[in-house]
Image (tube, rainbow, N blue to C red):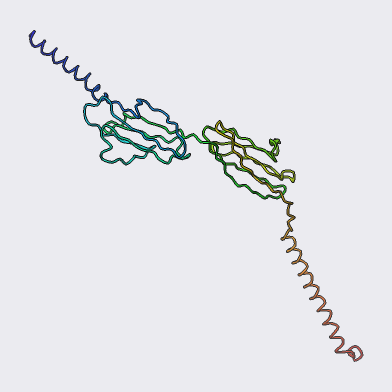
Amino acid sequence: MAWNSSVVMQMGRFLLLVILFLPREMTSSVLTVNGKTENYILDTTPGSQVSLICAVQNHTREEELLWYREEGRVDLKSGNKINSSSVCVSSISENDNGISFTCRLGRDPSVSISVALNVIFPPLLSGNNFQTVEEGSNVKLVCSVKANPQAQMMWYKNSSLLDLEKSHHQIQQTSESFQLSITKVEKSDNGTYTCTAKSSLQTESLDFHLIVKDKTVSVPVEPIIAACVVIFLTLCFGLVARRKKIMELCMKDKDPHRETAL
């Protein structure tokens, strides 16, 4: 009986060791990218190229690695998947800012490490440089902007800081645009407006030329047509009435002795 109890205790200890050991075995592998063991941000610039090398640490067998650009899987050559894998990001542009690359363990996708690109570039401005509007109408000057780090935006008019009038000017800013709205344009609004973006790298400007022309006097077409119709009908009725009188006179001229005979 004592022998059976000893066997049971030894079996219990063995199972406990197996239970404790298996999870540690399954999660012992660690991924690194360029020697870093945690997610990180990689600073870069437009036109440059970066290499990302993912490797498995503490592995006891060959491990397949997978690369993802955002949510899309990156195609890898067969010799670039086992235990160590690299991807090369070339011709980096401003549009790659914030894009993340993730290396995952093939048998356990929860084991992963990510790298986000931080593309640093000066302000880039664009927009419709020339606009012609009528006096009294509304206009919007939209200055599209891209910058990293974010730029400080300002509007100038004829080389001087724009004096904003609450009921006349309105500014709206998003991460990609800086918009100036002018309500009920006046002749005094005519001029050159400059969108200026200032970042820690440099300052960029873009001119918008606003031409305010005289308000066009529109001729009301419908009342004129209605008046023409009335005049035409009046003439028609007048001609009909005169025709009756003319006919009566003609009848009298044809029978000048009719009253004498009677």
Identify the residue at horizontal 32%, vertical 41% (top origin).
75
- Tag count in the figure? 0
Determine whether, in the image, residue 69 is placed left or right of residue 80.
Answer: right
> Which residue lies most toward the top here?
2
Residue 134 point in image, percent of width and height: 70, 50
Residue 206 in picture, x, y percent from top left: 61, 42
The residue most toward the right is 260
Instruction: Determine the residue positioned at 64% across, 44% down.
Output: 208
Quadrant (top left/top right/bottom left/bottom right) for the N terminus: top left
**Percent position of residue 245, x then y:** 84, 79
**Closer to the camera in the image, 202 or 211:** 202
Quadrant housing residue 29: top left
Image quadrant for the C terminus? bottom right
Residue 188 or residue 227, whichever sits in front: 188
Examine the image and state in which quarter residue 17 appears. Answer: top left
Residue at the image point whose x is 39% and y is 35% from the top: 50
**Image: 29 above or below 252:** above
Identify the residue at image location x=65%, y=49%. 131
- Name the residue at the front extreme: 48
Nearest the camera: 145 or 7? 145
Horizontal and vertical percent position of residue 55: 30, 30
